[in-house]
Amino acid sequence: MLNIILTADASGAAHAGNRGLVVVVVDVIDFSTSMEAAIDAGAAAIYGAAADSARPPVKTDPYQMGYLAGTEARRLGKAVVVLAEPRVGEEEKRRQGILKCLGGVQSSGARVSCIIPNIGAETPRLADITGMVVLGATGTGGVAFDAAVCAGSPAVVTGTVARTMAKNGFSSARAAAGRAVSEARRLGRDIAVVAASGNSLEDILAAEYIYKTLMEMVR
Protein backbone atom coordinates (compact mmCIF):
# COMPACT_ATOMS: atom_id res chain seq x y z
CA MET A 1 0.00 0.00 0.00
CA LEU A 2 1.22 3.48 -0.83
CA ASN A 3 1.83 5.94 1.98
CA ILE A 4 0.57 9.48 1.44
CA ILE A 5 1.42 12.65 3.34
CA LEU A 6 -0.03 16.15 3.22
CA THR A 7 2.17 19.21 3.51
CA ALA A 8 2.49 22.82 2.33
CA ASP A 9 4.79 25.47 0.90
CA ALA A 10 8.06 25.21 -0.99
CA SER A 11 9.72 23.94 2.20
CA GLY A 12 7.23 21.06 2.36
CA ALA A 13 7.84 20.30 -1.31
CA ALA A 14 11.59 20.27 -0.72
CA HIS A 15 11.26 18.00 2.32
CA ALA A 16 9.14 15.57 0.29
CA GLY A 17 11.61 15.69 -2.57
CA ASN A 18 14.49 15.00 -0.20
CA ARG A 19 12.65 11.87 0.97
CA GLY A 20 12.30 10.71 -2.64
CA LEU A 21 8.52 11.04 -2.73
CA VAL A 22 6.34 11.65 -5.75
CA VAL A 23 5.07 15.21 -5.25
CA VAL A 24 1.65 16.60 -6.20
CA VAL A 25 1.76 20.41 -6.37
CA VAL A 26 -1.60 22.06 -5.71
CA ASP A 27 -1.83 25.74 -6.66
CA VAL A 28 -5.44 26.29 -7.64
CA ILE A 29 -5.09 29.97 -8.64
CA ASP A 30 -3.65 29.41 -11.14
CA PHE A 31 -0.54 27.27 -11.74
CA SER A 32 -1.97 23.79 -11.30
CA THR A 33 -5.26 24.72 -12.96
CA SER A 34 -3.33 26.08 -15.95
CA MET A 35 -1.38 22.82 -16.08
CA GLU A 36 -4.54 20.72 -15.90
CA ALA A 37 -5.96 22.72 -18.79
CA ALA A 38 -2.70 22.23 -20.70
CA ILE A 39 -2.88 18.47 -20.16
CA ASP A 40 -6.49 18.51 -21.39
CA ALA A 41 -5.30 20.36 -24.51
CA GLY A 42 -2.70 17.70 -25.30
CA ALA A 43 0.51 19.03 -23.74
CA ALA A 44 3.24 16.41 -24.02
CA ALA A 45 4.87 17.31 -20.70
CA ILE A 46 4.63 19.94 -17.97
CA TYR A 47 7.28 21.56 -15.79
CA GLY A 48 7.39 24.29 -13.17
CA ALA A 49 10.05 26.85 -12.37
CA ALA A 50 10.44 29.63 -9.84
CA ALA A 51 9.99 33.17 -11.10
CA ASP A 52 13.18 35.24 -10.83
CA SER A 53 11.77 37.31 -7.95
CA ALA A 54 10.98 34.27 -5.78
CA ARG A 55 12.95 33.97 -2.54
CA PRO A 56 11.86 30.70 -0.91
CA PRO A 57 13.76 29.36 2.12
CA VAL A 58 14.82 26.30 0.11
CA LYS A 59 16.85 25.77 -3.03
CA THR A 60 15.30 26.37 -6.45
CA ASP A 61 17.00 26.42 -9.84
CA PRO A 62 14.80 27.95 -12.55
CA TYR A 63 17.67 27.81 -15.07
CA GLN A 64 17.86 24.04 -14.62
CA MET A 65 14.08 23.68 -14.85
CA GLY A 66 14.14 25.61 -18.12
CA TYR A 67 16.92 23.36 -19.37
CA LEU A 68 14.97 20.22 -18.45
CA ALA A 69 11.83 21.49 -20.20
CA GLY A 70 13.85 22.48 -23.25
CA THR A 71 15.65 19.14 -23.39
CA GLU A 72 12.33 17.31 -23.38
CA ALA A 73 11.00 19.61 -26.08
CA ARG A 74 14.03 18.92 -28.26
CA ARG A 75 13.62 15.18 -27.73
CA LEU A 76 10.04 15.46 -28.94
CA GLY A 77 10.86 17.83 -31.79
CA LYS A 78 8.52 20.43 -30.29
CA ALA A 79 8.72 23.89 -28.72
CA VAL A 80 8.20 25.16 -25.17
CA VAL A 81 5.11 27.16 -24.22
CA VAL A 82 5.86 29.27 -21.15
CA LEU A 83 3.22 30.42 -18.64
CA ALA A 84 4.16 33.42 -16.54
CA GLU A 85 2.90 36.43 -14.64
CA PRO A 86 1.56 39.09 -14.55
CA ARG A 87 -1.72 37.89 -16.03
CA VAL A 88 -2.30 41.20 -17.82
CA GLY A 89 0.07 43.32 -19.85
CA GLU A 90 2.57 42.77 -22.61
CA GLU A 91 4.59 39.61 -23.17
CA GLU A 92 7.83 41.51 -22.62
CA LYS A 93 6.87 42.24 -19.02
CA ARG A 94 6.34 38.54 -18.37
CA ARG A 95 9.62 37.74 -20.13
CA GLN A 96 11.60 40.11 -17.91
CA GLY A 97 10.41 38.30 -14.79
CA ILE A 98 11.58 34.82 -15.87
CA LEU A 99 14.95 35.35 -17.53
CA LYS A 100 16.60 32.52 -15.60
CA CYS A 101 14.32 29.75 -16.84
CA LEU A 102 14.30 31.23 -20.34
CA GLY A 103 18.09 31.08 -20.27
CA GLY A 104 17.84 27.40 -19.43
CA VAL A 105 15.49 26.74 -22.33
CA GLN A 106 17.81 28.61 -24.67
CA SER A 107 20.84 26.64 -23.49
CA SER A 108 19.05 23.39 -24.32
CA GLY A 109 18.67 24.48 -27.92
CA ALA A 110 14.86 24.40 -27.75
CA ARG A 111 12.57 27.11 -29.04
CA VAL A 112 10.11 29.08 -26.92
CA SER A 113 6.97 29.37 -29.03
CA CYS A 114 5.29 31.98 -26.80
CA ILE A 115 5.04 33.36 -23.27
CA ILE A 116 1.42 33.50 -22.19
CA PRO A 117 -0.36 34.52 -18.98
CA ASN A 118 -0.92 32.01 -16.20
CA ILE A 119 -4.70 32.32 -16.26
CA GLY A 120 -5.98 28.86 -15.35
CA ALA A 121 -8.74 27.01 -17.15
CA GLU A 122 -8.76 29.13 -20.30
CA THR A 123 -5.01 28.81 -20.92
CA PRO A 124 -5.46 26.67 -24.08
CA ARG A 125 -7.40 29.52 -25.71
CA LEU A 126 -4.21 31.58 -25.77
CA ALA A 127 -1.91 29.25 -27.71
CA ASP A 128 -1.71 25.91 -29.47
CA ILE A 129 -0.47 23.59 -26.73
CA THR A 130 -1.00 20.25 -28.49
CA GLY A 131 2.17 18.18 -28.30
CA MET A 132 4.12 21.03 -26.69
CA VAL A 133 6.12 21.10 -23.47
CA VAL A 134 4.55 23.58 -21.04
CA LEU A 135 6.71 25.38 -18.48
CA GLY A 136 4.97 27.36 -15.75
CA ALA A 137 7.32 29.96 -14.28
CA THR A 138 5.42 31.41 -11.35
CA GLY A 139 5.84 32.72 -7.83
CA THR A 140 4.01 29.96 -5.94
CA GLY A 141 3.20 26.74 -7.79
CA GLY A 142 6.25 27.03 -10.01
CA VAL A 143 8.40 27.56 -6.91
CA ALA A 144 7.02 24.43 -5.20
CA PHE A 145 7.53 22.34 -8.35
CA ASP A 146 11.07 23.65 -8.74
CA ALA A 147 11.89 23.04 -5.06
CA ALA A 148 10.66 19.45 -5.19
CA VAL A 149 12.79 18.66 -8.24
CA CYS A 150 15.87 20.37 -6.79
CA ALA A 151 15.50 18.35 -3.57
CA GLY A 152 15.41 15.07 -5.47
CA SER A 153 11.79 14.13 -6.14
CA PRO A 154 11.72 11.47 -8.86
CA ALA A 155 8.42 12.77 -10.24
CA VAL A 156 6.36 15.91 -9.75
CA VAL A 157 2.77 16.21 -10.95
CA THR A 158 0.18 18.92 -10.50
CA GLY A 159 -3.36 18.82 -9.17
CA THR A 160 -6.40 21.05 -8.88
CA VAL A 161 -10.05 20.92 -7.94
CA ALA A 162 -10.98 23.73 -10.32
CA ARG A 163 -12.98 23.22 -13.47
CA THR A 164 -11.28 23.28 -16.84
CA MET A 165 -12.88 23.39 -20.27
CA ALA A 166 -12.81 19.57 -20.32
CA LYS A 167 -13.37 18.60 -16.67
CA ASN A 168 -15.36 19.50 -13.60
CA GLY A 169 -13.57 19.88 -10.28
CA PHE A 170 -14.19 16.30 -9.17
CA SER A 171 -12.71 14.81 -12.34
CA SER A 172 -9.76 17.22 -12.18
CA ALA A 173 -8.99 15.93 -8.68
CA ARG A 174 -9.35 12.29 -9.74
CA ALA A 175 -7.10 12.87 -12.75
CA ALA A 176 -4.38 14.38 -10.55
CA ALA A 177 -4.65 11.55 -8.05
CA GLY A 178 -4.49 9.01 -10.86
CA ARG A 179 -1.30 10.55 -12.26
CA ALA A 180 0.31 10.51 -8.83
CA VAL A 181 -0.60 6.88 -8.17
CA SER A 182 0.64 5.83 -11.59
CA GLU A 183 4.01 7.52 -11.03
CA ALA A 184 4.31 6.22 -7.46
CA ARG A 185 3.66 2.62 -8.49
CA ARG A 186 5.98 2.89 -11.47
CA LEU A 187 8.79 4.20 -9.28
CA GLY A 188 8.02 2.27 -6.10
CA ARG A 189 7.71 5.50 -4.07
CA ASP A 190 5.22 7.10 -1.72
CA ILE A 191 3.34 10.36 -2.36
CA ALA A 192 3.30 13.86 -0.88
CA VAL A 193 0.46 16.26 -1.64
CA VAL A 194 1.72 19.84 -1.33
CA ALA A 195 -0.49 22.90 -0.95
CA ALA A 196 1.73 25.37 -2.79
CA SER A 197 0.96 28.12 -0.28
CA GLY A 198 0.12 27.51 3.34
CA ASN A 199 -1.42 31.00 3.34
CA SER A 200 -3.89 30.11 0.58
CA LEU A 201 -7.13 28.56 1.82
CA GLU A 202 -8.03 27.31 -1.65
CA ASP A 203 -4.72 25.48 -1.94
CA ILE A 204 -5.05 23.92 1.50
CA LEU A 205 -8.64 22.75 0.96
CA ALA A 206 -7.86 21.45 -2.52
CA ALA A 207 -4.79 19.59 -1.28
CA GLU A 208 -6.89 17.98 1.46
CA TYR A 209 -9.47 16.88 -1.09
CA ILE A 210 -6.84 15.38 -3.41
CA TYR A 211 -5.23 13.69 -0.40
CA LYS A 212 -8.59 12.07 0.49
CA THR A 213 -9.10 11.07 -3.14
CA LEU A 214 -5.68 9.41 -3.16
CA MET A 215 -6.45 7.55 0.07
CA GLU A 216 -9.61 6.16 -1.50
CA MET A 217 -7.68 5.03 -4.57
CA VAL A 218 -4.95 3.14 -2.75
CA ARG A 219 -6.95 1.48 0.03
Image (spheres, rainbow, N blue to C red):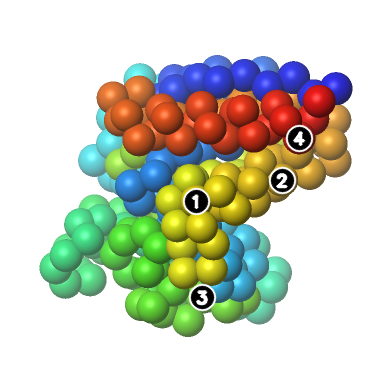
Q: Secondary structure at mark 1?
A: helix
Q: How many marks?
A: 4
- Foreground mark, 3 or 2, reads 2
> Residue 29 or 173: which is nearer the viewer?
173
Q: Can you tell which mark lies on residue 69? A: none
Q: Secondary structure at mark 2?
A: helix
Crowd band around label 3 with a 10 angstrom C-alpha radius: few (<14), some (14–19), many (20+): many
Q: Disc 3 marks which residue? A: 129
Quadrant assignment, res 195 = top left
Quadrant assignment, res 88 = bottom left
> Residue 133 or 5: which is nearer the viewer?
5
Q: CA distance from mark 1 to mark 3?
A: 21 Å
Q: Secondary structure at mark 4?
A: helix
The image shows residue 160, relative to residue 82, as above or below, that is above
Q: Can you tell which mark lies on residue 169? A: 1
Amino acid type indicated by mark 3: Ile
Residue 147 seen in the figure = no
Which of the marked residues, 4 or 1, is nearer the chain's N terminus? 1
Residues tagged 1 and 3 counted as in contact (Cβ below 8 A): no
Which of the marked residues, 2 or 1, is nearer the chain's N terminus? 1
Q: CA distance from mark 4 to mark 3?
A: 30 Å
Amino acid type indicated by mark 2: Gly
Which of the marked residues, 1 or 3, is nearer the chain's N terminus? 3
